[in-house]
Image (cartoon, rainbow, N blue to C red):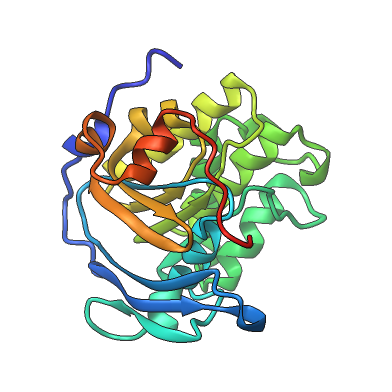
C-alpha cells in the first residue's frame, strides 16, 4: 500500500458542483431509552476531499453516519442538505457501505443488477455500469459467482462497487476495510480515491490512523457522543487542538462514560 498517493483527496478537482452539499448537522441528539449516544452534535461537510470520522469505540461515529444518511431519525436537531431537509431525490443520490457487507443470495453481477434496477436505471445502461464497476473493482472474473461464497475482501469490494455503480453524489463508508488483508485494503482504497477524483463526496469512518493519513482531507474527531474537533487532516495530525484527540493519537485508552 506504500504506492498509494499521499492525501490525493486534498488536491481533487471537481468537474461540477456537488448538488447535495453542503451537508449540515444542527444540534443532533440521539438518545434511545434516554441514554444519549449523541448529544448536541453540529458540523458542516462540504466539497473538497475525503472527510474521515475518527474517535474511540463508543464515541458515536456509526450512529452519526446513519443519522446523516437518513437510516436513523434524530431525537432532536436536524440534518440539512444545501439548507433543506432530505427528500426522495436526495436519498437516491447517496449510498452507504457497511463494515459487514450486506449481499443478496445472488451472483456478483446480479447484486449490482438488483441495485441498479431498484434505482430506475434503464436495462442497457445497467449492463454497462455493471461491467465498468466490476472491472474497476478487479472482480469482473467473479461476475457469475454467488456473492456469498466470495472471500471477505472480495465481498467488500463488491459492496463498494455496487454502491459506486449508482453514481452517488455522496458515499458514506463505515469502516469498509476493517479486518481485511493489505491487498484488499489497497484495492478498496483505490476505489475510494478514484470516486473522490470523480467528484463523489466520501464521508468515511476508520480506526486505522495510517489509512486516515493516506486518504483524509479533513478529520471529524468524536469523543463521548460529541464532535471534539473538526479540522484539516494535516492540522489534526500535527497539532490537534483537543486533549481527547491528543490522547487518542498517543494511544492512551479513553473509554466513554456509560457506553
- When asked about the image quadrant of residue 235, the answer is top left
Q: How many marks?
A: 0
Residue 62: x %, y % from top left: 54, 58
Residue 253: x %, y % from top left: 54, 37
User: Nearest the camera: 57 or 258?
Assistant: 258
User: Nearest the camera: 246 or 104?
Assistant: 246
User: Nearest the camera: 139 or 66?
Assistant: 66
Residue at image point 69% right, 40% down? 155
Direction top: furthest residue: 2
Is residue 17 visible in the rendered image? The answer is yes
Residue at image point 82% right, 55% down? 105
Q: Is residue 207 left or right of residue 12?
A: right
Residue 86: x %, y % from top left: 38, 82
The image quadrant where one finds the C terminus is: bottom right
Is residue 86 visible in the rendered image? The answer is no
User: Nearest the camera: 110 or 98?
Assistant: 98
Residue at image point 63% right, 58% down? 113
Residue 142's place in the image compared with 15, above or below, is above
Residue 82: x %, y % from top left: 23, 76
- When asked about the image quadrant of residue 193, the answer is top left
Residue 181's place in the image compared with 194, above or below, is above
Residue at image point 67% right, 82% down? 33
Amino acid at each position: 500500500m506504500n504506492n498509494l498517493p499521499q492525501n490525493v483527496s486534498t488536491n481533487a478537482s471537481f468537474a461540477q458542483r456537488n448538488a447535495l452539499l453542503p451537508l449540515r448537522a444542527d444540534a443532533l441528539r440521539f438518545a434511545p431509552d434516554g441514554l444519549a449516544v449523541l448529544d448536541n452534535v453540529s458540523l458542516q461537510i462540504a466539497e473538497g476531499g475525503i472527510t474521515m470520522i475518527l474517535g474511540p469505540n463508543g464515541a458515536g461515529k456509526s450512529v452519526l453516519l446513519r443519522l446523516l444518511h437518513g437510516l436513523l431519525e434524530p431525537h432532536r436537531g436536524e440534518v440539512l442538505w444545501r439548507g433543506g431537509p432530505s427528500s426522495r431525490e436526495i436519498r437516491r443520490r447517496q449510498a452507504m457501505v457497511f463494515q459487514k457487507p450486506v449481499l443478496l443470495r445472488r451472483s456478483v453481477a446480479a447484486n449490482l443488477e438488483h441495485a441498479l434496477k431498484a434505482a430506475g436505471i434503464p436495462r442497457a445502461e445497467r449492463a454497462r455500469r455493471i461491467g465498468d464497476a466490476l472491472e474497476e473493482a478487479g472482480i469482473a472474473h467473479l461476475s457469475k459467482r454467488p456473492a456469498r461464497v466470495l472471500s471477505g475482501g472480495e465481498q467488500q469490494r463488491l459492496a463498494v462497487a455496487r454502491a459506486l455503480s449508482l453514481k452517488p453524489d455522496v458515499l458514506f463508508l463505515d469502516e469498509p476495510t476493517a479486518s481485511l488483508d493489505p491487498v484488499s485494503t489497497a484495492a478498496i482504497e483505490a476505489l475510494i480515491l478514484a470516486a473522490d477524483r470523480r467528484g463523489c463526496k466520501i464521508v468515511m469512518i476508520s480506526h486505522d490512523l495510517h489509512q486516515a493519513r493516506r486518504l483524509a482531507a479533513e478529520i471529524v474527531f468524536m469523543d463521548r457522543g460529541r464532535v471534539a474537533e473538526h479540522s484539516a487532516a494535516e492540522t489534526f495530525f500535527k497539532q490537534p487542538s483537543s486533549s481527547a484527540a491528543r490522547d487518542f493519537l498517543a494511544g492512551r485508552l479513553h473509554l466513554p462514560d456509560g457506553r
